[in-house]
Image (cartoon, rainbow, N blue to C red):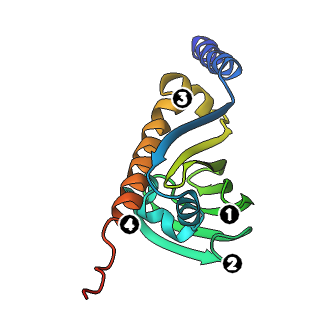
Amino acid sequence: MTLFFYTLIAIITFFAFLHAWASKEFNISRTVVINRPKDEVFNYVRQLKNEHTWMPWFVQDFEGVLKYKGEDGKLDALLYWKGHKLFKEGTQKIIKIHQGKIIETRFLIVSPMKTVVLDYKGLKEMDENKTKMVWGVKGGLAFPFSVIALLHPIEKAYGNDLEAGLKNLKNLMEVKNQYREPSVYR
């Protein structure tokens, strides 16, 4: 029985050491150039109702309910979801907007474990029909996620999702505007 307790204390000490050594915060981002005007891209990405068309978390793994509160695309607008395969239930709220430049939202994931993540999108006009967009997420890593991140880095885990989402957005924005209504023939 004594050996069992010493082993248990050793395991707990080992994980406590890993947690103390591991990073407790993350901040990852990706960038894309979209061949559309900045205002058009900004007005699309600030709308919470549009996120299910390009964000990989909604495109791939969502089979539930989406509810909206407030004026979409404005400060304090809120998205509630329930039924995601990984992030079961939560909210996303617009907490900061600088028109045409920056939008920040706060994700509050309540199930399976309470987590808060900041999502940010920054846009810069490269020329009148070309926009550079940075999309990123940042947050904290509580135990046991800080230890898990040592084996499976957050950069690797979510970096690919950010790249996929930006690729979806780029394709959506560029293709969406190629097929305009035909002009009236004279």
Left or right relative to 105: residue 43: left
What numbered label is drawn on residue 148? 3
Per the image, label 3 sits on a secondary structure element best described as helix
Quadrant including the N terminus: top right
**Residue name at image x 53 percent, y 65 percent:** 44
- Which is in the foreground here, disc 3 or disc 2? 2
- Which is in the foreground here, disc 4 or disc 3? 4
Dot 1 corresponds to which residue? 93
Q: Residues within 10 Å of mark 3 (few under 14, many from 20)?
A: some
User: In the rendered structure, which amino acid carries the disc numbered 3?
Assistant: Ile
User: In the rendered structure, which amino acid carries the disc numbered 4?
Assistant: Asn
Judging depth in this view, the residue of 102 and 158 nearest the camera is 102
Q: Residues within 10 Å of mark 2 (few under 14, many from 20)?
A: few
Judging depth in this view, the residue of 111 and 161 nearest the camera is 161
What numbered label is drawn on residue 177? 4
Distance CA(mark 3)–CA(mark 2): 37 Å
Q: Residues within 10 Å of mark 1 (few under 14, many from 20)?
A: many
Q: Residues within 10 Å of mark 4 (few under 14, many from 20)?
A: few
User: In the rendered structure, which amino acid carries the disc numbered 2?
Assistant: Gly
Per the image, label 2 sits on a secondary structure element best described as loop
Residue 33 x/y as whole percent: 47, 45
Distance CA(mark 1)–CA(mark 2): 10 Å
Per the image, label 4 sits on a secondary structure element best described as loop
Dot 2 corresponds to which residue? 70
Per the image, label 1 sits on a secondary structure element best described as strand
- Which is in the foreground here, disc 4 or disc 2? 4
**Residue name at image x 36 percent, y 66 percent:** 176
User: In the rendered structure, which amino acid carries the disc numbered 1?
Assistant: Lys
Upstream in sequence: badge 4 or badge 1: 1
